[in-house]
Amino acid sequence: MRILLAEDEHALATWLVQALQQSQFQVDWVNDGRLVRQSLKATRYDALILDLGLPGRDGHDVHSDLRDADLRLPVLILTTPRTNCAPL
């Protein structure tokens, strides 16, 4: 299974890529929302892990583009708070 990971936080993306690869997934990683469309046109993916807070083109717009294009691709939404919060 080939997955496109769209995540701009390097440490999180690196961890996710390693974890997914250990589970035998093929993973391509982009860190900008503008690169998602290019990647989807160039390669067939089985799923997309999409951060909502991407630079360039945010995840909401990317997801809307996928729906408008009727691209039937499973999407897992990934997001983290952008503020420094104290742990619970």
Image (cartoon, rainbow, N blue to C red):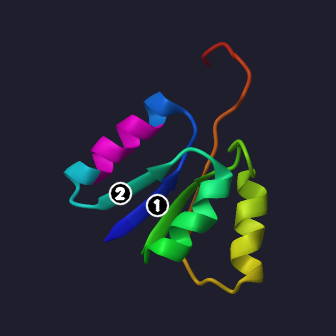
- Does 22 sit left or right of 55 as displayed? left
Contact check, label 2 and label 1, Cβ < 8 Å: yes
What amino acid is found at the position of numbered circle 1 in the picture? Leu
Q: Quadrant of the C terminus?
A: top right
Mark 2 or mark 1: which comes first in sequence? 1
For residue 74, say whether it is visible. Answer: no
Q: Which residue is mark 2?
A: 27
Dominant secondary structure (helix, strand or loop) of the stretch shown in magenta: helix
- Front residue (pair 37, 75): 37
What label does residue 4 carry, if any? 1
Above or below 42: residue 79: above
Amino acid on which the number 2 mark rests in the picture = Val
The residue at the point 69 percent across, 74 percent down is 66
Label 2 neighbour load within 10 Å: few <14, some 14-19, many 20+ = some
Taking the image as shown, residue 67 lies to the left or right of residue 3, namely right
- Left/right placement of residue 30 relative to residue 55 reads left
User: In terms of image quadrants, where is residue 25?
Assistant: bottom left
Q: Which residues are magenta?
A: 13-20
